Structure formats: structure tokens, C-alpha cells
């Protein structure tokens, strides 16, 4: 059996997250399992690089699977046929062979998310960004984002009831940038806790709106208490944008 990585992107609006669920076919993992199994004529069960929640999007996503075929790597015809049968909001980009012990989730060394805020109504992007009614102070939010870089325990931003073995994460970047009618937050870490990015964004927005001071932000992080942090922002503004693997996987050696 050969092991492959598949690189894909998807718009999460119509799906109840990545992971297969017992009473619905509306998950990205289910759609990929079903279509790969159909084309390869054997059962296929993909393992994703992470569990995105309902409504969350992914511009760069990887999953691994095994099958008996040894001719999938770089097979443009197979990618074409897979995209023909996948829903229009899921796009396969590339399939490449990896070592038999390679793991899409556990071997990732960094992940990047973006959160998109919309400052006024946009008829074409109502499900791809969260429209807010006010314009927050981006400078203050960047100061707050810089403050987060001093910490490695983010229990205050972890969804209550999550089965996380550890709440420690190593942040390597966190910053805001305004792009015309949008404000985009970018954050990179070795791992993320469940609901962490949406909770961080909600808390930093409180700083940008003058509801929370930088001193209070430090106390929130130190508390480790989810109830002290801001509300989680809606899922539809969140994007998984980049996954980094060890160099020998050659994940980013080809452009689609």
C-alpha cells in the first residue's frame, strides 16, 4: 500500500466542519472519502491535518490516505477526474507520495490562520468575512497581538470541555492589517487549541474597541480562564491558510 498526501482547498459554508459525523454527509472528510473510494474502487479513509469547525474555510489543507495504486503521484488526469466528482466548493490541487509513516496532522510543524473582518456590507462576501458595525483601533489590536507573543499557555482561549492534553502553543506571528474594506488578522503557531483563534480575535477586538486594556489582556492570559476572555467571533470569517511540514516531505516544491 502506498501512502499519499493530498493538498486541497475548500469553502466551509455548506459543511458541518471537516470531520466525519454519524448523522450527516455534509462534512469535507466524508465527501473526500466517498469520491476517492469511488474513483479508486477501494475503501479510502483520509486523515486530515486538523479539524476545522462548521463554516470555517481552508485555502491550504492536507490529508493523507493509503491505497493500492502506485500511480497517483503527479497524476494530473486523476486530479482532474477527482475535481469533476467533488462538490464545487472543494478543490483538489495535488497528490504526492510520502513515507509510509508520514502523518498529515502530527507531522505538521506550523499552521497559519487568517480572520477576515468586513467594515461595510459586501454583497459578494457575506459568508467569507464577518461584517462589523464599528472600526476598531488596529494599532491597539497590534499592540495586544504583540503582547500574546510573550506567552505559551493559551488555556484562556480554549473551548470549555475540550479534551486537550496540553494548552501550550508556540506562537511565531500575530498581527493585524487593514486592506481597504477589510481588516485581516494573521496568526501562526506550532499548534492551536479548539476554538482558540476565534476566541483570540474576539478578545483583541475588545482591545480595539476600548473595552479591554493591554494590562487587562495580560491578566486574562495569565488567568487561564476561558470566561475571562472575549466572545468567540463567528466561524465564517476564519481561514486555514498555510500548513508547514518538514522539508523532506517536499510539500511546497510545486505550484498549482
Image (tube, grey):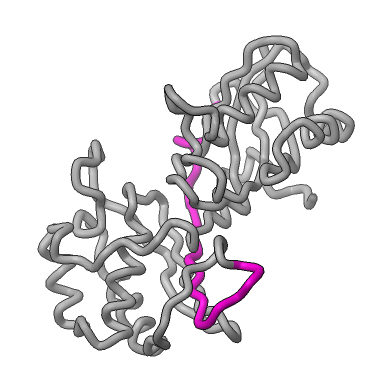
Give the magenta part as a residue range: 102-125
Position of 185 relative to 32 (above/below): below
Q: Position of residue 165 (x, y in %)?
A: 23, 38
Quadrant for the N terminus, please.
top right
Residue 243 in sight here: no
Q: Depth check: 14 or 196 in front?
A: 14
Residue drawn at (66%, 68%) of the image? 124
Q: Depth check: 109 or 59 in front?
A: 59
Position of 150 relative to 206 (above/below): above
Residue drawn at (89%, 31%) of the image? 77
Q: Position of residue 32 (x, y in %)?
A: 63, 29
Residue drawn at (63%, 18%) of the image? 66
Position of 245 relative to 145 (above/below): above
Q: Is residue 136 left or right of residue 116?
A: left
The verdict on residue 114 being magenta is: yes
Residue drawn at (53%, 54%) of the image? 240
Residue 200 in sight here: yes
The verdict on residue 15 being magenta is: no
Amino acid at each position: 500500500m502506498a501512502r499519499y498526501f493530498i493538498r486541497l482547498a475548500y469553502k466551509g459554508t455548506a459543511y458541518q466542519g471537516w470531520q466525519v459525523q454519524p448523522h450527516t454527509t455534509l462534512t469535507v472528510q466524508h465527501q473526500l472519502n466517498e469520491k476517492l473510494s469511488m474513483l479508486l474502487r477501494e475503501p479510502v479513509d483520509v486523515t486530515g491535518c486538523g479539524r476545522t469547525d462548521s463554516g470555517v474555510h481552508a485555502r491550504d489543507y492536507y490529508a493523507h490516505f493509503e491505497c493500492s495504486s502506485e500511480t497517483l503521484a503527479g497524476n494530473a488526469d486523476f486530479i482532474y477526474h477527482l475535481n469533476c466528482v467533488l462538490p464545487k466548493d472543494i478543490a483538489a490541487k495535488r497528490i504526492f507520495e510520502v513515507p509510509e509513516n508520514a502523518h498529515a496532522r502530527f507531522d505538521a510543524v506550523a499552521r497559519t490562520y487568517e480572520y477576515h473582518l468586513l467594515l461595510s456590507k459586501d454583497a459578494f462576501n457575506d459568508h467569507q468575512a464577518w461584517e462589523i458595525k464599528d472600526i476598531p483601533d488596529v494599532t491597539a489590536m497590534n499592540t495586544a497581538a504583540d503582547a500574546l507573543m510573550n506567552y505559551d499557555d493559551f488555556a484562556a482561549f480554549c473551548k470549555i470541555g475540550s479534551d486537550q492534553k496540553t494548552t501550550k502553543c508556540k506562537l511565531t506571528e500575530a498581527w493585524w492589517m487593514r486592506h481597504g474594506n477589510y481588516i485581516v488578522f494573521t496568526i501562526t503557531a506550532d499548534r492551536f487549541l479548539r476554538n482558540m483563534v476565534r476566541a483570540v480575535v474576539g478578545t483583541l477586538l475588545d482591545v480595539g474597541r476600548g473595552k479591554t486594556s493591554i494590562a487587562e489582556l495580560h491578566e486574562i492570559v495569565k488567568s487561564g480562564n476561558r470566561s475571562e476572555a472575549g466572545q468567540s467571533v463567528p466561524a465564517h470569517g476564519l481561514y486555514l491558510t498555510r500548513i508547514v511540514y518538514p522539508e523532506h516531505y517536499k510539500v511546497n516544491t510545486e505550484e498549482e
